[in-house]
Image (spheres, helix red, strand yellow):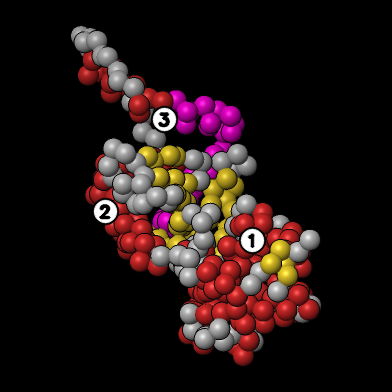
Amino acid sequence: MKSQLNRAVIEGLSESTNKIFAENVNEIVYSLVSQAMEEISIKSPFIKLEKCNLIPVNEIYLGAFCQLSEYDYFLGVENTQIEFNSKVKKSWWKYVWREFKASWRIGRKKKYKKKKNAVEETKTSVTVERYKLSDLRHDLMFKIADQITATSMVYEYPQKLSIVGSDDFGTGVRINIFVTIFDSKTGTFKLYKENKNHFIEVNFGQRFENLDEKREQCGEIFVDIARVFNALYSKAYDRIPNQILIESLLFGCPNSLFDENDVYKTFLNISNYIRIKDPRSFKSICDPSKSLFDEPLIVRSNAQVDFGKLINMLDRFKY
């Protein structure tokens, strides 16, 4: 049996988010990271503020967030030395064990016994570690933790930091900061996969320029429709759809289908257009020279499945 999807539901979903709230969270994140990186740059010869780049990378950039949305950012640091140091030449398991021991030592207090030749022993036993992305992630975690209240928590994962705290950010907010290497010449972010000991390259290409252009041409109704699709998909499948896929589909819809004064009519126009159009005719929002399923950011995340689920979702609703 098909679910009723009427004008009231669509209009309600398009107006269900607080833009001021999201802007406030975004400002706090930029302030935290900027201050943290400034303090790190004073102590580290490898970090230059002008070589750091922080951008929102999911639906937060467009403002098409819904109840399940998280605040995802890429922090890119342009430094070849850190990139070289991050790749492990030895056994990966030895590397994991060393990182575990380093993290464990940070949290416990040590008791030192005085020795006669303590200075000489220290000189001979101390080894200098090469500064890696994991070290930058450690430093960033501690600097951010110093700025937030005791009710907030910072969690460290292999590729990112996650921050939660209702007193600092608001209810239901989870912030993810992926620490990466950035190449300004190509606009590529490099995520290091520790378990496979290699970098995954992420290039958003013309995504942000194309989104801004489409938004300027169609107005805020473009954002509203993206938000509706995200809300419906997350309700149906309990997860956010691949945003490159959603943005590419909406980017490929003619501007004439967007009616600034009628979000329900626009939703019907867009839904019918996507359902009857050959999916291979849609172009990537990141690179319009590529078809929808030639885009690495879609293929890599298996977003073809998302496309099938999206069409099935639209078919289940009664308009």
Q: Mark 1 points at which residue?
A: 233
Q: Quadrant of residue 88?
A: top right
User: Upstream in the sequence, badge 2 or badge 1?
Assistant: 2
User: Upstream in the sequence, badge 3 or badge 2?
Assistant: 2
| Front one among 262 and 52 | 262
Q: Is mark 1 on a helix, strand or loop?
A: helix
Name the side, left or right, on which 113 lies relative to 311. left
Query: From where the camera sits, is residue 213 visible?
Result: no
Q: Where is residue 107 in the image (x, y as percent from the top left)?
A: 35, 26
Q: Report the amino acid beneath label 3.
A: Ser
Name the side, left or right, on which 162 lies relative to 68. left
Q: Where is residue 209 in the image (x, y as percent from the top left)?
A: 50, 78
Q: What element carries label 3?
A: helix
User: Upstream in the sequence, badge 1 or badge 3?
Assistant: 3
Q: Mark 3 points at which residue?
A: 103
Image height of 317 relative to 118, above or below: below
Q: Mark 2 points at which residue?
A: 35
Badge 3 density bin: few <14, some 14–19, many ≥20, Cα 10 Å = few
Q: Report the amino acid beneath label 1.
A: Tyr
From the image, give the main secondary structure of the stretch colored magenta.
helix
Quarter of the picture containing the N terminus is: bottom right
